[in-house]
Amino acid sequence: MRSPVSYIIRNQKIYAQNEIIENGFIKIEGGIISSIGEMENLQSDDGFVDISLPKGSSVMPGMIDVHIHGVNGADTMDATTDALDTMTMTLPKEGTTSFLATTMTESKEKIEKALINTGEYIDAQKEAGKAEILGIHLEGPFINSGKAGAQPLDHIAEPCVETYQKWQKASRNHIKLVTLAPELDQEHELIQHLKQNGIVASAGHSNATYDQMCEAIDKGVRHVTHLFNQMSGFHHREPGIVGAAFNRKELMVELIADGIHVRPEAVEVAFHQLTDERMILITDSMRAKCLKNGQYDLGGQMVTVRDGMALLDEDTLAGSVLEMNSAFKNIQKFTGCSIQEAIKITSENPARQLGIFDRKGSIDSGKDADLVIMDEQMNVVMTICKGEIAYVRGDGSE
């Protein structure tokens, strides 16, 4: 493996961890941010290669997607190295520098095969210049059949500690987040096991009541999977999971900000309730992202993609084709939030939830050089993953 280049970004607006630097520099050495600051404080730059950027660009922390199944024809459940290569090489185009490879409800054999493949891939990751797989999001099969959505009904299973332990071992201990229906984990055995082992337990694909959610939160649930979608909704006499997501401050809450899964006005309501302290934007995208309208496989089912919508049938959404940079723009459009708030819910919050804020999720000295450079219209100009340029707009790779 070749030695990483030492780069310098200069004369740019930088959204650093604790401040906005209007005219600053970033030094990158060995894949790490070695220093940042105002241009007037830049001293020696000998040995650094300049990264040329368009005027009016802004440098922001790379985005982290904790819920993504696939992109550009590839899916985590394909259980191949080629599929994961496609994901890690494609995602920087949308500003994503790291992510959780997400599984879905299929046969136990297929899930285990995907876990083995992804675990081996994660352990072999050494090459910079690609989006990093931070771990695995196990979505299903421990879900409620009444809220399955596009998850195949035939393979839904009761929450089981033994099954989870087997899968965690198969993944080489890379499962970091588990979506389950809390009401089916009646003794909270799996939820408590996840908490005790530092794994994020998330409520999703669930028909839990508000009281059942509160019990599960008290036992260790700390996350909500794609708010509003395939869960018990808010009613004034039964607030459901949505009510718990709004009320219980222990929870970090995912949301798909494509304007399709959740209409813009509901996104705005959610943002006002959660604020940038507890919201995490995700894509929940499937293999059809970046591809043309047509039919694509999802968990052995045919999904029709048409004009930005992925449908299992006329009424059932089947994941999304949303890109993270679009979610970043949409949340500002739908809610009027600031760029800093949008950064927090696409970078900082997911990093904090996964316990990796010491190395990712913001621009600060000593952290991984995971950076996305955007133009004045918030379009991705360049993405840097661990100090290596992973994507440049207009370089012919689009």
Image (cartoon, rainbow, N blue to C red):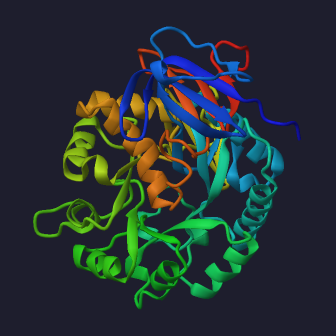
Residue extending farthest to the bottom is 187
- Location of the C terminus (image quadrant): top right
Q: In the image, what residue occupies the spot 16% across and 62% down? A: 235
Q: Image check: 32 left or right of 147? A: right
Residue extending farthest to the front is 43
Q: Image check: 378 left or right of 66? A: left
Q: Image check: 229 left or right of 89? A: left
- Residue 139, position as x, y percentages in the image: 55, 63
- Residue 305, position as x, y percentages in the image: 55, 34
Count all numbered tags in the image, as a single digit: 0
Q: In the image, what residue occupies the spot 36% across and 29% down? A: 20
- Above or below 47: residue 164: below
Q: Image check: 27 left or right of 253? A: right
- Above or below 269: residue 3: above
- Above or below 125: residue 109: below
Residue extending farthest to the left is 236
- Location of the N terminus (image quadrant): top right
